């Protein structure tokens, strides 16, 4: 073996005294891109729904089923996806997921009815499922204790950014190409290219990466050694034993309430703006971009605030409880106010405020590595996202039934406000951020 190689096979390009490289931030910038693409593909059907519903002649209830279908397999595959990341490492898991969901996005273009389109959405959900649990595991591997907040919000920041860009990109492609079908093909092929890029950039350990110097690897490993010293001796219990811990259920329920509000906005706000406030497809694309880009900015600010505060010496428990409380209270007030306002500009402003504060809760993706031991982070991330996507399954259908039976979005908005209250309770009262689970 070449003497310039480390024991893991990566070249050691470091001279004594070299400053640490910052490859971990490059990896998490790529994860931001991947999750953004994930949500562009996810949001595409919401943006195209006014056209699809006319072409396939389907009403609000059937639209709700179609919007929900993605989440059926996405939720079911969360825990298996997390276990895949624990077993095979995040690199292979992320690359396989990305190429797979690009394929299903592209073949949706050939569907001739809503049932076939729903089938491609099932495939899309199954393929996308491992990306978040694997990203949570990357956070535990590559980020230190004072960087995990920014790592988590870079990972999850792709959700509002991709939702914002999805509205612009898909509506622009539809307007330019004159077809939602061709727009879906372009999105799918672009996603598969991103999978190739992920293989080039991501590694399962810092010392496996050719661009990481010894200073960066040592910095990460020393921080993890200090963290590992605080881990309890594991009991060797089975995964089902996690269900006996309140923190696990607080994490599950908190993420479920978070996503009840977020997925409600993601799946139904385009239709709401068109039906209630008369937005055409270009106006709708611009409004949705503003709303979700505000969420992206809020996500980055939340991660920066958390790491800055923890770095100053505050406890993780105090920081997370405080930020989650502020975020959930202000998001709840904003979404409730939407039901009372008729001016379209004010509605977009309130929805933007809702998403700005709600997305602070992207910090939830630091929780699996905070409360779990290193070997269980993937599983805990999958279990948490299972909760979130149980909401993804139910909320689009429930909103569709509410709108069809009442002819109004009022009760749907009240349901979203209730989800904000649930998020407040779960994130501030149910999770013990100071104690790792000994399994």
Image (cartoon, helix red, strand yellow):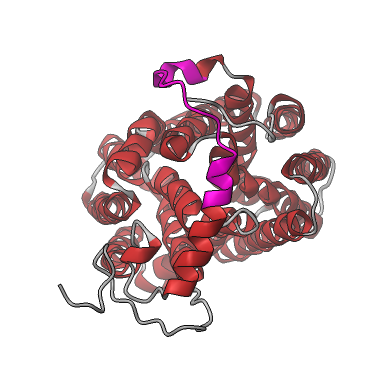
Q: In the rendering, at what x and y percent does residue 227 appear? A: 57, 46
Q: In the rendering, at what x and y percent does residue 135 appear? A: 44, 51
- Residue 162 visible: no
Position above or below: 77 against 360: above
Q: Is residue 200 left or right of residue 223?
A: left
Quarter the N terminus occupies: bottom left
- Total residue callouts: 0
Membership of 152 in magenta stretch = no
| First to last magenta residue range | 225-242
Question: For residue 400, which quarter of the picture?
Answer: top right
- Residue 148 visible: yes
Residue at x 47%, y 26% (from the top left corner): 234
Q: In the rendering, at what x and y percent does residue 193 appear? A: 27, 68
Residue at x 51%, y 69% (from the top left corner): 25
Give whichever of 30, 287 is nearer the camera. 30
Q: Is residue 290 left or right of residue 281?
A: right
Give whichever of 357, 244 is nearer the camera. 244
Give whichever of 327, 236 is nearer the camera. 236
Position above or below: 172 against 363: below
Residue at x 42%, y 85% (from the top left corner): 15
Position above or below: 128 against 238: below
Give whichever of 149, 274 is nearer the camera. 149
Q: In the rendering, at what x and y percent does residue 49 appear? A: 45, 48
Position above or below: 26 against 320: below
């Amino acid at each position: 073996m070449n003497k310039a190689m480390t024991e893991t096979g990566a070249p050691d390009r470091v001279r004594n005294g070299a400053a640490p490289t910052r490859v971990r931030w490059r990896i998490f910038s790529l994860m931001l891109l991947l999750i953004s693409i994930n949500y562009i593909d996810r949001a595409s059907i919401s943006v195209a729904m006014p056209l699809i519903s006319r072409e396939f002649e389907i009403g609000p209830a059937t639209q709700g089923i179609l919007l929900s279908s993605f989440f059926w397999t996405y939720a079911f595959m969360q825990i298996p996806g997390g276990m895949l990341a624990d077993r095979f490492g995040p690199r292979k898991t992320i690359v396989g997921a990305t190429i797979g969901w690009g394929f299903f996005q592209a073949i949706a273009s050939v569907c001739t009815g809503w049932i076939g389109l729903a089938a491609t959405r099932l495939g899309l959900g199954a393929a996308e499922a491992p990306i978040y649990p694997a990203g949570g595991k990357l956070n535990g591997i590559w980020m230190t204790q004072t960087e995990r907040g920014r790592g988590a919000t870079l990972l999850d920041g792709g959700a509002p950014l991709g939702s914002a860009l999805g509205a612009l990109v898909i509506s622009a492609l539809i307007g330019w190409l004159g077809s939602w079908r061709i727009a879906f093909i372009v999105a799918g092929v672009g996603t598969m290219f991103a999978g190739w890029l992920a293989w080039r950039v991501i590694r399962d350990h810092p010392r496996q990466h050719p661009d990481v110097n010894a200073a960066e690897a040592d910095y990460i490993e020393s921080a993890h050694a200090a963290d590992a010293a605080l881990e309890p001796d594991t009991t060797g219990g089975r995964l089902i034993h996690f269900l006996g811990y309140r923190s696990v259920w607080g994490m599950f329920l908190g993420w479920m309430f978070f996503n009840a509000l977020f997925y409600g906005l993601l799946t139904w706000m385009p239709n709401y703006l068109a039906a209630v406030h008369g937005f055409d497809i270009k106006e709708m694309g611009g409004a949705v971009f503003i709303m979700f880009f505000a969420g992206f900015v809020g996500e980055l600010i939340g991660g920066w605030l958390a790491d800055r505060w923890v770095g100053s010496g505050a406890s993780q428990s105090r920081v997370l409880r405080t930020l989650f409380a502020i975020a959930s209270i202000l998001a709840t007030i904003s979404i409730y106010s939407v039901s009372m306002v008729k001016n379209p500009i004010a509605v977009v402003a309130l929805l933007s405020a809702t998403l700005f504060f709600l997305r602070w809760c992207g910090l939830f993706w630091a929780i699996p590595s905070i409360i779990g031991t290193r070997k269980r982070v993937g599983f805990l991330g999958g279990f948490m996202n299972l909760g979130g996507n149980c909401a993804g399954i139910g909320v689009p259908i429930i909103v569709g039934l509410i709108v069809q039976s009442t002819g109004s979005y009022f009760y749907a908005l009240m349901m979203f406000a209730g989800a904000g209250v649930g998020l407040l309770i779960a994130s501030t009262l149910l999770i013990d951020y100071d104690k790792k689970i000994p399994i």
